[in-house]
Structure formats: C-alpha cells, structure tokens
Image: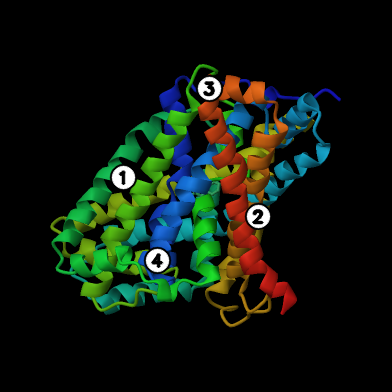
C-alpha cells in the first residue's frame, strides 16, 4: 500500500522554529494550571521531585524517540508508524500507537478547551477590575460563580474551540510561528514578575519549603502514577504530537540538543508557576489541595495587589490563553494530519468536524463542575476526572512506552545513528540503556505497581 505523506510536505524554516513550536505545544495549561494544583493535591515536595525524575529519565528520552520517528517517517503519526514498520520489517500492530494517540488527543482537547475557556473569561474579569485589591473571599467567590454557571462555561469553551479551529483550519505554521516568537518570551517575563511579587509576599519561604521539602510519608504508588502522567502531559508526549511536529524538522538539526532545550524550558515554566503560586496560597490562608481552581483563585489576588495589577493580570491571562491555544493546536495535529493525508480531505473541513466532536465531549467536563458535580459513576470519578486520568495517566504513558520500545528495539540501529547523529558506540549504548530499558521499565513498573492492585483486589 502506498502511504500518503502529503500533509507534511512543509518544513519548519529553522531549528529554532521547531523549538518554538514544540515549546508552544509543551508549555500550556499543563505547566501553569495543572502542575501547581496536582503538586498541591499530592503533598508538594515529594511529588515535585518524583516528577522531575520522570521528566529527566522518562520524558526526555521518549521525546527524543518521538521526534526521531517523526522526522524519519515524515507523515502523520499513524502513517509514520505504518511506513516505519514496513521499512524495518516490524509488525504492523505498532500502528495501534498512532490510533491511541489520536484518541488521547480528542479526549484531552475536550477538557483542555473548557479550562482554557476559564482563562479567556479571566481576561475580561481582570480587565474589568474585578480583582483590584480583592480579598481571598472575592477571588474564591468569583471562581465559584463561574463554576456554577454551565451556560457561561459552555460559551467560553465554544469561543476557545472556535479560535483553535480557525487557526488549525488555516494551516499550522502560518502566523503561528511569528506569534509564538513574541508571546512565549513575554509569558516568561510575566512569570518572572509574578515570581518577584511572590518572593516579596512574605510567604516565599513557606512556598519554597512546600515545593522542595521532601517528605516520604506522603508518597504512595499513586504519587508515581500521577507524577509520571504529568511528565507526559506537560511535555506533550505519548500521543504523537511530537511525532507530528518532528515530521517538519529539517534533516540537519540535532535532535538531542533540541529536545533538551524544550524540556528545560518546559520545566522552568512549571517550577516558576509553582513558586509564584504557593507562597500566595500560604500568605492568604488558602487551601493548597483545592484542586483545579488553584491558579484562578491565587493569581488574581497577586494582581489585585500589584501596581497596574489589572493591566498585568489581563496581559497574563491573554498569554496563558495563548499558551493554551498553541498546545490545543498541537493536540489536533496527529488526527488532522492523518485524515487530510489519508482521504485527501480539506483541512478546514476536518478541523471543523474535530472541533465539533471535542466541543460536544467537553460538555461532560463543563457539567462535572456543576450539575454533575456529585455524579461519580466511573470508579468513583466524575466525567472530567475520568477523561483526564484515563488520557494522562494511562494512554500517554502507554503510548510513550511503546514509542520508546519501537524506537530503540524495532528500528534498525543504522537509522537511529543517522537520525541522532551518533558515531560514538558509548553514546549509542547509553541511548539504548536509557531509552530502551530505563524509560520503558520505569513506565511499566509504575503501571504494574499502581494498576495491578485495582484488578486483583
Ligand atoms: N503539554 C500541553 C500542556 O502542558 C498539553 C498537551 C498534551 C499538548 C499532549 C499536546 C499533547 O499544556
């Protein structure tokens, strides 16, 4: 069968643009919204350390594998896997990876757009001065009000989805590259400003201790699963996004150093967001483990106190929304590239259909915060928790495990050497040990340790 690759004819115009696009995908709600709240729910320090270990020993090698497969295949993830299995004489079952990635992308986007909708709403709220000199009660009350209003949430969810689909329909690289180039650095600067505020807020020592004091007592098997899932989620791994983006990477770029840059940037943003948020939690007597509302309750408080806070706050939520859009776009890419390639379909049509499906599915998440808040029919989880945990803690790590195994053990060594530009045998050995043994074994061990008891009890 001839495998079509026409959707991926373009190339990023330079290595740096791939770094920006991949960082645009990686840096998003996962860093600024999710990392702090799940670190808060899982006891802080121990979680953060385990997460960093997962990023370094599991995330980084798997990202290298994913980008490498993408660049070698130069097609949508599903067709890349078809092509590479044919070329290397491996079983065509590996293509399952691509399909699971497409499914995970749809699930993640469905709730991602809901949360990003909150960020869009907060642009208006901050601009209108809602949080000027606001108390913790006002901040909490404003957030609760939004939660209790499904119609409003649906509206913002729709706005976010429309913006994403509009950009996706026009083609990924046009305009986006330029925007990422300006907005990303600005987001870093604003995070530093927030960090500066939180250093001077009087709660910094406590926030720092919460994030970095290691306490074994709070670590359970679950902590490992959640930290690992978060490492995959924040680095956009295990579902083909990096494979899809890797397909556009010029042949002469060095994958190893490129991936390292992305991983460091992403980790920096997550840690900075945590360090900005936790001191404010302590100073204002808020709850560290309050869950998904954490960022939306604490940061407005900081903006409320800062000079020109309404302006800063507005810009901040614009940038967060923008970071969410670049991630959301990358969530659609594996599915869209595949359908366009395979059926010669119009990109805009595919984008609209996918957006519609994800929006509808997202209603389950919208209702999970209000009318279905007490409905927990799925293993004691509500709809949002189910979709979130299934995609992040199961599908992404499983996808990553298979990607690493394929890249290291099924792909011919000569291809790996050429793709990673490795001549030294010791480097090759290191790659096989870390990428082919430590990373997959790490994922497998966490799975066995946490999931097996669910089925045997
Ligand atoms: N990495 C993104 C974030 O942290 C989310 C994402 C996950 C994007 C998987 C693409 C693929 O917000």
| Mark toward the start of the polypeptide (1 vs 3) | 1
Mark 3 secondary-structure assignment: loop
Q: Position of residue 197 (x, y in %)?
A: 17, 58
Q: Residue furthest top?
A: 252
Neighbour tally class for label 3: few under 14, some 14-19, many 20 plus, Cα within 10 Å: some
Does the beta carbon of the residue at mark 1 sit less than 8 Å from ligand 1? Answer: no
Compared across the picture, whether 240 is left or right of 260 comes to right
Say which of marks 2 and 3 sits in front: 3
| Mark toward the start of the polypeptide (4 vs 1) | 4
Compared across the picture, whether 246 is left or right of 213 comes to right
| Label 4, label 1: how far apart the Cα atoms are | 27 Å
Q: Quadrant of residue 410?
A: top right
| Mark toward the start of the polypeptide (4 vs 2) | 4
Say whether marks 1 and 3 touch (CB < 8 Å).
Answer: no
**Which residue occupies 53% across, 40% down?**
61
Question: Where is mark 3, residue-wise?
Answer: 422
Compared across the picture, whether 307 is left or right of 343 comes to left
Question: Where is mark 4, residue-wise?
Answer: 46
């Amino acid at each position: 069968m001839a495998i079509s690759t026409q959707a991926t004819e373009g190339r990023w115009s330079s290595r740096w643009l791939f770094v920006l696009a991949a960082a645009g995908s990686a840096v998003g709600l996962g860093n600024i919204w999710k990392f702090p709240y799940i670190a808060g729910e899982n006891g802080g320090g121990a979680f953060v350390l385990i997460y960093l270990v997962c990023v370094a020993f599991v995330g980084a090698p798997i990202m290298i594998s994913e980008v490498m497969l993408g660049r070698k295949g130069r097609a949508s993830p599903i067709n890349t896997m078809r092509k590479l299995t044919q070329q290397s004489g491996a079983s065509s079952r590996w293509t399952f990876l691509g399909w699971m990635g497409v499914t995970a992308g749809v699930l993640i986007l469905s709730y991602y757009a809901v949360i990003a909708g909150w960020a869009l709403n907060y642009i208006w709220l901050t601009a209108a001065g809602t949080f000027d000199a606001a108390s913790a009660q006002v901040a909490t009350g404003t957030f609760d009000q939004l939660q209790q209003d499904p119609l409003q949430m649906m509206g913002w969810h729709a706005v976010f989805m429309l913006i994403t689909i509009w950009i996706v329909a026009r083609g990924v690289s046009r305009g986006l590259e330029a925007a990422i180039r300006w907005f990303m650095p600005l987001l870093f600067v604003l995070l530093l400003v927030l960090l500066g505020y939180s250093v001077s807020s009087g709660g910094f020592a406590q926030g720092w201790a919460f994030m970095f004091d290691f306490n074994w007592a709070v670590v359970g098997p679950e902590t490992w699963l959640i930290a690992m899932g978060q490492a995959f989620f924040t680095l956009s791994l295990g579902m083909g996004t990096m494979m899809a983006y890797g397909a556009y990477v010029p042949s002469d770029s060095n994958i190893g150093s490129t991936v390292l840059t992305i991983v460091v940037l992403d980790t920096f943003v997550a840690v900075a967001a945590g360090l900005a948020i936790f001191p404010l939690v302590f100073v204002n007597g808020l709850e560290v483990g309050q869950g998904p509302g954490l960022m939306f309750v604490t940061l407005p408080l900081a903006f409320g106190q800062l000079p020109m806070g309404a302006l800063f706050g507005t810009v901040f939520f614009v940038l967060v929304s923008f970071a969410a859009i670049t991630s959301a776009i990358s969530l659609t890419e594996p599915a869209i590239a595949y359908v366009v390639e395979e059926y010669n379909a119009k990109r805009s049509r595919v984008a609209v259909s996918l957006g519609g499906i994800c929006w509808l599915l997202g209603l389950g998440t919208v209702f999970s915060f209000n009318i279905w808040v007490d409905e927990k029919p799925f293993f004691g989880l509500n709809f949002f928790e189910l979709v979130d945990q299934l995609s992040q803690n199961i599908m992404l790590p499983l996808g990553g495990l298979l990607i690493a195994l394929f890249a290291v053990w099924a792909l011919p060594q000569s291809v790996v050497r050429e793709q990673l530009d490795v001549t030294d045998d010791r480097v090759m050995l290191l790659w096989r040990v870390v990428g082919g043994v430590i990373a997959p074994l790490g994922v497998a061990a966490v799975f066995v340790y946490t999931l097996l008891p669910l089925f045997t009890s």
